Image (spheres, helix red, strand yellow):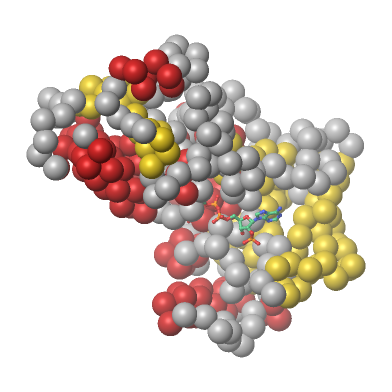
Amino acid sequence: GSGPAGFYTAAALIDSGVDISIDIIERLPTPFGLIRGGVAADHQTTKNISKKFEKTALMNQVRFYGNVEIGRDISLAELREMYDAVVLAQGAPVDRVLNIPGAGKAGVFGAAAFVGWYNAHPDFRTLNPDLGVQAAAVIGVGNVAIDIARLLSRSDKGLAVTDLPDYAETAMSGSPIKDVYLFGRRGPVEAKFTNVELREMGNLSECVPQVKAEQLPDGVGDLSDRDKRLKERNLENLRQFSERHPDEKPNRVHFEFFAAPVEILGTDKVEGIRLERTRVEDDRAVGSGEFFNVACGLVVSAIGYRGTPLDGAPFDESRGIIPNDDGRVDDGLYAAGWIKRGPSGVISTNRPDGVTAAEHILNDH
Ligand code: NAP
């Protein structure tokens, strides 16, 4: 895999100064994994990290083999015979399944597919979602959900500085979407988005965030000092959002907390979503028995990603990862990044994974 975890591992091995030769093997013809296929098209500064990876790719010790799929073109067992060490860094490429009635209707997409579509990922470029709708729902309140909501609610002007492929820019800038709903099954304190990403929602030129003041608690509760600071900042932003006027801008993003999706409504195509009001008990969302519907013509489920099994490697089905001991999987076999620890953290979170995998390799050989 040639995403951040793969490249950070290669860089750490090179930095060690040992005489080493590294082949980076990638299923797609192109490198950089989620930097190319996952980071939002309007976050170009984040994508700049690929320039650093490119430097690693161009080192004499490194070769890139694109369009080579393990299990199709070569087996893991063959690789393990050919190399002293094999690092599994293939990430978590598929969506966690939205397991509610109606989830199979036309107009319902997983975030991996939807984000892949607007990033021209070869697996998803033909997804062709119908954006000719007035309202869209995004399930989940993590950073992926925020990315999708932000892009759906930007207009021509905001989309101009992206690397969207032409087909996605045409679909998005021509879309009549006015209202995007973000549904969190728990409360604002439990939401997974980070502060920079949340704050950005308040500074868009074409879209105003909407929050129900009555859904915001007075305090963040019993947390570590660090978490407390971060969550208080989020709450402060959400409080400011709750005072914004819905007609300030042409489009709106509605943050709706304590709302668990229970059914996608419509005949063949999605026409709305049914949700149950929740409260949080012992950190979990508990249904209240009170339901409500929101009309929308598009649903994107951004409820997290999952790794997939690889022939010849163990797999933890419940966590969607390759079981490992701090990056060690087996003799000469290592794991780094999301396939090692699950789909969380930012790009640089993969750096220590790469450093650890490199340390194991250097110690073992
Ligand atoms: P995430 O942060 O784990 O968020 C997943 C969201 O889905 C949570 O709000 C979760 O709620 C909700 N959810 C899960 N199962 C659900 C269900 N069955 N019904 C309703 N809601 C459900 O995952 P992500 O947004 O995919 O992001 C993955 C990682 O990439 C994160 O670490 C993220 O920060 C990172 N990322 C960073 C950036 C950036 O830095 N700009 C951009 C994109 C992604 P619960 O909390 O209740 O489970």
Query: Which residue ends up furthest to the top in the rendered image?
Result: 73
Query: Which residue ends up furthest to the bottom in the rendered image?
Result: 218
Q: Residue at x 47, y 75 (%)?
A: 227
Q: Is residue 40 visible?
A: no
Q: Residue at x 55, y 63 (%)?
A: 192
Q: Quadrant of ligand 1?
A: bottom right
Q: Above or below — where is 66 with respect to 17? A: above
Q: Residue at x 69, y 75 (%)?
A: 282
Image position of 140 (left or right of 231): right
Q: Quadrant of the C terminus?
A: top left
Image position of 272 (left or right of 166): right
Q: How many marks do you count on the picture? A: 0
Q: Position of residue 126 (x, y in %)?
A: 59, 23
Image position of 219 (left or right of 160): right
Q: Residue at x 46, y 61 (%)?
A: 197
Q: Above or below — where is 361 with respect to 203? A: above
Q: Quadrant of residue 87?
A: top left
Q: Is residue 103 visible?
A: yes
Q: Position of residue 210 (x, y in %)?
A: 63, 68
Residues 162 and 316: in front is 316
